[in-house]
């Protein structure tokens, strides 16, 4: 066997090996994509329930506000419920946006596109929780009455005001620090440890495995 035949055999072998590797990459990519999409199913189910329950809750809050206005309830009570209602509506809108993104991920075959949408999905999850904590002060103001302020101003100033300020500071701190850069901190893991968040993380991990395989 001369050198030319040997070279041709090696070329044929290399071509077959490259085709085999290409086929393996394609199969593994497709499997990982399906796993990534499947990991989001529990997340999607939870978000659908969140939207449904959230809509019912908003209707309930609307009825409370209507009753409060009709019966001339304390301005603090009415304002607190209105703020809570606005935050709830915002959260529902963001959940609907997340469901739209999950549907786009289900219909996507491009790894980079899926990674971008997953990043948006995680960002929206952080925004929802952050906004929810930003309303913390309203849970300390709904029971305040004008009568209490007039009849016991010292009591109100020394007890209620510090509590409201403390909840306000805590809400602002959480809103600012609920960020992906704190994902490894214990308090962050405590807040984001349910199936809704874990499904998104697992999906992202499957996509990262595809990139790792291609790189190797």
Image (cartoon, helix red, strand yellow):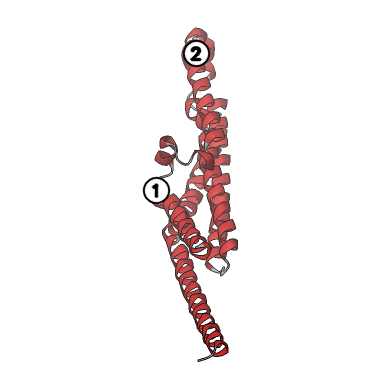
Q: Is residue 182 above or below residue 166?
A: below
Pick the residue in front: 53 or 150.
Answer: 53
Q: Classify 10 Å Cα crowding around label 1: few (below 14), some (14-19), many (20 and above).
A: few
Mark 2 or mark 1, earlier in chain: 2
Q: Position of residue 28 (x, y in %)?
A: 46, 71
Q: Residue at x 49, y 78 (%)?
A: 23
Task: Name, please, the residue furthest toward the top.
Answer: 154
- Between the residue at mark 2 and the residue at mark 1, the CA separation in whole angstroms equals 39 Å
Q: Classify 10 Å Cα crowding around label 2: few (below 14), some (14-19), many (20 and above).
A: some
How many numbered discs?
2
**Which residue position is annotated with label 1?**
194
Pick the residue in front: 129 or 51.
Answer: 129
Q: Residue at x 56, y 47 (%)?
A: 123
SS at badge 2: helix
SS at badge 1: loop
Residue 88 visible to the viewer: no
Task: Name, please, the residue furthest toward the bottom.
Answer: 1
Q: Which one is in front in this view, the residue at disc 2 or the one at disc 1?
A: 1
Q: Position of residue 211 (x, y in %)?
A: 52, 61
Q: Position of residue 189 (x, y in %)?
A: 42, 41
Q: Is residue 75 above or below residue 88?
A: above
Q: Residue at x 53, y 29 (%)?
A: 173
* Circle on res. 141: none
Q: Residue at x 46, y 58 (%)?
A: 203
Marks 2,1: beta carbons within 8 A:
no
């Amino acid at each position: 066997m001369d050198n030319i035949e040997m070279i041709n055999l090696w070329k044929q072998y290399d071509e077959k090996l490259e085709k085999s590797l290409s086929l393996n990459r394609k199969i593994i990519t497709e499997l990982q994509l399906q796993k990534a999409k499947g990991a989001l199913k529990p997340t999607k189910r939870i978000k659908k329930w969140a939207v449904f329950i959230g809509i019912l809750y908003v209707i309930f809050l609307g009825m409370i506000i209507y009753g409060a206005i009709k019966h001339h309830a304390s301005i603090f009570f009415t304002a607190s419920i209105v703020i809570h209602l606005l935050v709830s509506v915002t959260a529902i809108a963001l959940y609907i946006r997340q469901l739209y993104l999950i549907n786009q991920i289900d219909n996507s075959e491009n790894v980079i596109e899926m990674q971008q949408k997953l990043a948006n999905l995680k960002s929206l999850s952080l925004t929802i929780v952050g906004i929810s904590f930003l309303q913390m002060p309203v849970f300390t103001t709904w029971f305040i009455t004008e009568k209490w302020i007039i009849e016991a101003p010292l009591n109100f100033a020394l007890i209620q005001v510090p509590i409201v300020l403390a909840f306000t500071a805590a809400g602002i701190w959480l809103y600012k620090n609920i960020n992906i850069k704190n994902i490894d901190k214990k308090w962050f893991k405590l807040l984001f440890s349910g199936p809704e968040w874990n499904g998104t993380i697992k999906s992202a991990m499957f996509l990262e495995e595809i990139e790792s395989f291609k790189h190797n």
